[in-house]
Amino acid sequence: MPPVFDPYSSSAEEGLGMNGWLRRVGIVAAHIISLALTIFITLLSRPGTSLFSWHPVCMSVGFSLCMTEGVLLFSSEGSPFCFQSRKGRVRLHWVLQALVVIAGGTGLAFIVASKNVSERPHLTSWHGLLGMATLVATGCQALCGVCLLFPKWVNSVARLRLYHATCGLVTYLLASATLALAMCSDWFQGTIKGVLWYVCVLLPLLPALVVMNQVTNSYLPTYHRRMSRSESGNV
């Protein structure tokens, strides 16, 4: 069986590509921004006032908060879960990603119901189209993760972990772009205007950059090394 990737090893820390303090500040800022955006959108939506009001709440909780935390918890610097063991973090990752799927599915149900009631067409905006692509990618990631829970199902665990990390990054970037497009909607622009609107649009960029740096500079090179060792050992 291929060696299990340990994101807390020294090789993972050396590959982050940032100075320690800058990395720590970026991760802490990403935690704060993801939580602040979720709270802000929830307050702005006034959940319970309409069917639509639950859509931004579910999506922000799932993709802005849970998905971000599900990735950043693997960082040993600036993470509130740094006291957890590797096994504990992996379990928490699964819980958070399951919440992403549940929140995403619930948010989709609310927006479909809302548009059906108001007799409005579906998937007529870039936000809707990109959001659907994000949900499909999230579902595929969940299936990939289930396979990792049962390594006997797959021929190469190391390769599947590499695909999981790569596709996970793509899914997160899709979610970030969908969130930015949501702030270009008539609903959001009708309430938030001026400088605050520009701030809201730019804020999701920092967590996206932190996650992209963490995955591309730490996980992917390590996965490549582990996979190469595993394949050379099987020759």
Image: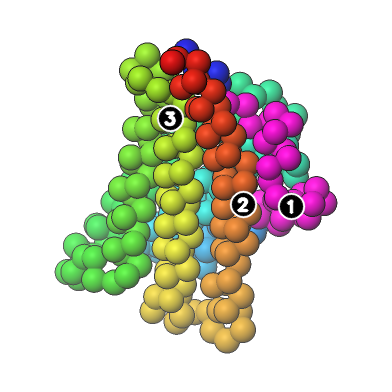
- Residue 62 percent across, percent down from the top left: 47, 48
Residue at 61% of width from left, 75% of height from top? 199
N-term-proximal mark, 1 vs 2:
1
- Residue 119 percent across, percent down from the top left: 17, 69
Amino acid type, mark 1: Met
- Dot 1 and dot 2 residues touching (CB under 8 Å): yes
Whether residue 173 can be seen here: yes
Amino acid type, mark 2: Asn
Query: Marks 1 and 2, Cα distance to the nearest angstrom?
Result: 9 Å
Q: Which residue is under mark 1?
A: 18
**Secondary structure beneath label 3:** helix
Q: Which residue is under mark 2?
A: 213
Which quadrant would residue 126 be assigned to in this image? bottom left
> In screen coordinates, is 190 left or right of 8?
left
Residue at 60% of width from left, 58% of height from top? 209
**Secondary structure beneath label 1:** loop
Residue at 28% of width from left, 51% of height from top? 109
Residue at 42% of width from left, 63% of height from top? 178
N-term-proximal mark, 3 vs 2:
3
Which circle marks residue 159 in the picture?
Answer: 3
Determine if the magenta segment contains residue 65: no
Q: Which residues are magenta?
A: 5-31
> In screen coordinates, is 31 left or right of 201?
right
Protein image colouring: rainbow
**Secondary structure beneath label 2:** helix
> Looking at the picture, does residue 40 appear above or below residue 141?
below
